[in-house]
Image (cartoon, helix red, strand yellow):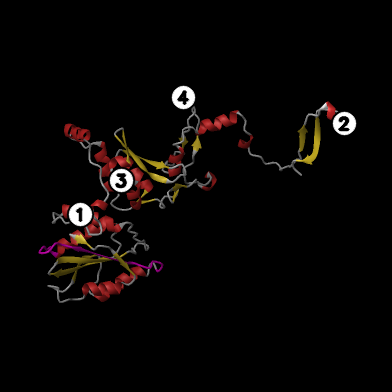
Amino acid sequence: MKGMQKIKRGKNFAGVVFYALRPASHHKTPPSVIGGNMDGSNAGELIAEFNATKALRPDVAKAVWHNSLRLPKNEALTNSEWAIIADDYMTRMGFSETHLRCYVLHDDEDGQHIHIIASRVSLDAGKLYLGKNENLISTRIIQELEKDYQLTRTKGTDALKPSSLPVIRKKSRNEAMLEERTGKPCPKSIIQKAIDSITLNPIAIDDFVEKLNSMGITAKCNLASTGKMNGFSFECKGVVFKASQLGKKYSWKNLKPMILMNSSPNIEDGRPVIPEPAAHRSDEAVISIVEHYPDEKLYPEIGVRPDTAPTSMTMRWIATIPYLVSVISALKTVRIPFLKAFNGPRKFFSVSMIHLSSVSLKQTKTNNFKPKGSHQKAHKPLLP
């Protein structure tokens, strides 16, 4: 099964609906609607329903979503089989039941294929389907459908060569032996399968971390010194893996399209945002630094109100600075003045510069000058 080389988006539902339902000489049977979640069956009724969703979001320029699924030549499915596969495909792509779509069957000499026409605007308050990196995701889903429904396995689209697809790092010899001996998957396989199952659809970064945590996997964000997000490291059963040890598929470059950073209130453009003062955030977690003294050392600890949960990326970021309290304590010990707030008026003082010079006895006799001391005051002040 193959999809279109590139999923298409458009402005006008009428054009794509008329194209899909228009009979042609190469069709063995007239095109017909075989599935979807719409009431209409002819072009006029379908267009009216689609335009109703488009009216919910007049700010969206391209509300039309169009793709096709094609079987190899001389293969065929029943209408109900096509509808089941198409519904599964749309669910895995991230469409909900409130996104209107219809499936139109074409049966010609090159084989059966269906056109999937959908609205990106949901009936549920006009929520918009974003579909980031959807061409690559669609190719992967089609390959999964071929395996799950026992269809003929086909290669991906010409635009996506196998060498360009993300690579999954294979298990090492020791890991393979461990699996064979215990009969259980090794930590690397557990992490890979968990990430694959979570990133089928776009997901917020906090939900991504929490779901992995519920599976016994700890995901730690790796931040640069500038605060920019560089990716994750994962821990399972006491074994820590960098993304490079899992494979290129799990690098931040390939995970980023599926993880929504801006959906989190504490992340913007991959950088953690310092939260507002607690007085303006009564419903959020409050960060406090608590001092402890194990082994005569100071370590920071995140204190959170009992009715909140430490899901903020900022809190996890601060927790990675083990020497923060030690630095503050050292500065307070030496009484650095800038640690104290200064609320008084600012004053400026003039400063006189002292010039030190040595005068020889011979010079004083020549100039008939008797020095009163070894220094003189210069009359030019340093500051006016």
CA neighbours of label 4 inside 10 A, class few (<14), some (14 to 19), many (20+): few
Dots 3, 4 in contact, CB < 8 A: no
- Asked whether the viewer can see residue 113, the reply is yes
| Numbered mark located on residue 250 in the image | 3
Q: Give the range drawn in magenta.
A: 58-78
- Which numbered disc flags the more N-terminal residue, 1 or 4? 1
Name which residue type carries label 2. Answer: Thr
Q: Which of marks 4 and 2 is in front?
A: 2
Query: What's the residue at 25%, 59% (across, down)?
Result: 159
Q: Is residue 122 magenta?
A: no
Q: Name the residue under label 4.
A: 294
Query: What's the residue at 36%, 42% (across, down)?
Result: 232
Q: Mark 2 points at which residue?
A: 366
Find residue 225 and report its horizontal and vertical position in percent.
46, 41
Name which residue type carries label 4. Answer: Pro
Q: What element carries label 1?
A: helix
